[in-house]
Every structure is written in C-alpha cells, then in structure tokens.
Image: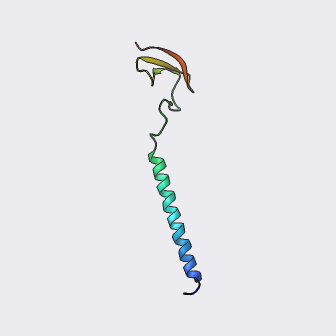
Amino acid sequence: MGALSIWHILVLIVLLAMIAGVGTLVFAIIKASGSGSRPVGRPPAAMAPGWYPDHADPSLLRWFDGQQWTPQTQPRA
C-alpha cells in the first residue's frame, strides 16, 4: 500500500470537518434546549424587587432586592 494521495487527504479533511460541524450542531441544540436549567432559587433577570414565596419554606415570603434574595422573610398571609 502506497502513500496517501492529495485526494485521500482532502477527503479525510472534508470528513473531519463534517464530523466537527455535526458535533457543534448537536452541542448547540443541547445547549438551546437547556433553557430550564437555571439553578433553583435563582430569580430571572427581569424580576422586580418585592416579596416572593420563599423557595425553602412555602409558609414564608422572602424579599428580593432586584438582584439577589435577601435574608429578610415574613409569614405568608
């Protein structure tokens, strides 16, 4: 068996590029489908400051300051 010709090398390069492209596409699809993968207790970016149900204790409300949950709680009415 002789050395690889330029055509064999080109075919190998094209096949590798296609495999890499499929892998990238699969990764993009998996990443896009993970839209519900936000950590529990982390609020969406668009939440306004206010009292919200506490994730750890449903009998409490917890204050959200617009950026993060605070230690302040109050009983739910």
Q: Residue furthest bottom?
A: 1
Q: Tell me the residue at 54%/19% (across/down).
A: 71
**Image: 14 above or below 65:** below
Q: How is the image coloured?
A: rainbow
Task: State the quadrant of the N terminus.
Answer: bottom right
Residue 18, image x, y percentages: 51, 67
Residue 48 locus on image (x, y percent): 52, 25
Position in image of residue 14 (x %, y %) = 54, 72
Residue that appears at 49% across and 57% down: 25
Coordinates of residue 20 in the picture (x, y in percent):
53, 63
Nearer to us in this view, 57 or 6: 57
Residue closer to the observer: 44 or 54:
54
- Image quarter hosting the C terminus: top left
Which image quarter: residue 60?
top left
Q: For the view shown, which residue lies furthest in the front direction?
A: 1
Which quadrant would residue 6 be assigned to in this image?
A: bottom right
Q: Is residue 67 above or below residue 5?
A: above
Name the residue rendered at 46%, 42% in the picture. Answer: 35
Look at the picture and state if 22 lies above or below 34.
below
**Is residue 6 shown above or below 37?**
below
